[in-house]
Image (cartoon, rainbow, N blue to C red):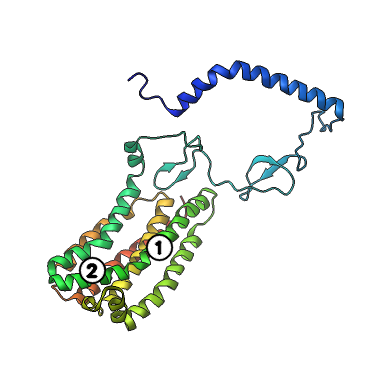
Amino acid sequence: MKNADSTRRTFFKRALAGGVVTGATLSTLGAHMALAHDDHGRDHDRDKDGRRARHSDYGDLRPTADEDGNTYLALPKDFRYVTFSKTGDAFGAGLVVPSRHDGMAVSRLRDLLMQARVPVVALSLLFALQELHIIVVKHQASDDAAGSYAVAAVAAKSIIWVAIGLGLYLLPEAARRVNAGLDARPILSRSLALIGLCAVPALLIFTFGGEQLLAAAFGDDLTGSADALPWLGAAMALLACTYLSVQYLLALRRRAFVGVLAIAATAEVVVLAGMGADLTKLAVALFLVQLACALVVVTTAYRSPSL
């Protein structure tokens, strides 16, 4: 097919090419007519160099700094704006903000995956840390026990959804602060504190009302992991802290933590495989693996304040 790789930009160029001469002529004529009419209607203010002052319906336009103190636009008095990013700014792990923010900067999927390989690998390992223990228990315990453990794990993972929501704020805000030369660690601290505030009441419910919770949510026949539920909840809260720290490190374009996640995922399988079929012991072992991983990753995050 001829010109099969034509892009939207090519289409626009061809569409504009036919009308550029007419458009330029008409716009130039219109501009001269408007200026002529305006010049006859009133006198214009001039700046100190004799140039025509710029006006708008809201007042004179003046160079205006954004909230970071950088000046990119001229706006009327009392107008404000926020600069989210600029072309070429770094964000994530080795990624840069593309040009043409209207959406014309289209990349192939393979190129996007190669640019985002560190986040993809890191998030895949986090998913493994979240799910591998369920697969191991399925091979270690009876079907009924594995089923009750699986539903307890579902309840325990509720805190992960909170972490995912916080991560949507943490990563871009941390990247913005670092690019502005600011310390981004307070953002991480607040995010981890919110995880703690959510985890404490959840763990109290898991500890003192776990059996009732599982019975109400999944049925009386799936309460066999009630004793394991508090440990699973604590393990998932630690994984939530690891997840947020990973998002922070991705904003700082750090990569060394990926090895820690790989070791932790491997350790999770090896340790749990040697724990037998006792669901509570398995949950405690998972907690210890997640604790070790969280300590290393969170500490790495706090020791990496800037690029």
Task: State the image coordinates of residue 223 (x, y, percent, origin top left).
Answer: 24, 78
Residue 134 showing in the rendered view: yes
Eyeballing the image, is 61 above or below 227?
above
- Does residue 82 appear to the left or right of 265 in the view shown? right
At a point 77% along the width and 36% down the height, the residue shown is 55
Task: State the image coordinates of residue 248 (x, y, percent, origin top left).
Answer: 42, 56
Q: Which residue is mark 1?
A: 163
Which label sits on residue 150?
2
Task: State the image coordinates of residue 231 (x, y, percent, origin top left).
Answer: 28, 75
Residue 275 showing in the rendered view: no
Amino acid, disc 1: Ala
Amino acid, disc 2: Ala
Q: CA distance from mark 2 to mark 1?
A: 20 Å
Give the residue furthest to the bottom: 208
Nearest the camera: 199 or 285? Answer: 199
Task: State the image coordinates of residue 151 (x, y, percent, origin top left).
Answer: 25, 70
Residue 38 quadrant:
top right
- Among numbered discs 2 and 1, the one appearing first in the sequence: 2
Which label sits on residue 287?
none
At a point 37% along the width and 80% down the height, the residue shown is 204
- Does residue 195 appear to the left or right of 182 in the view shown? left
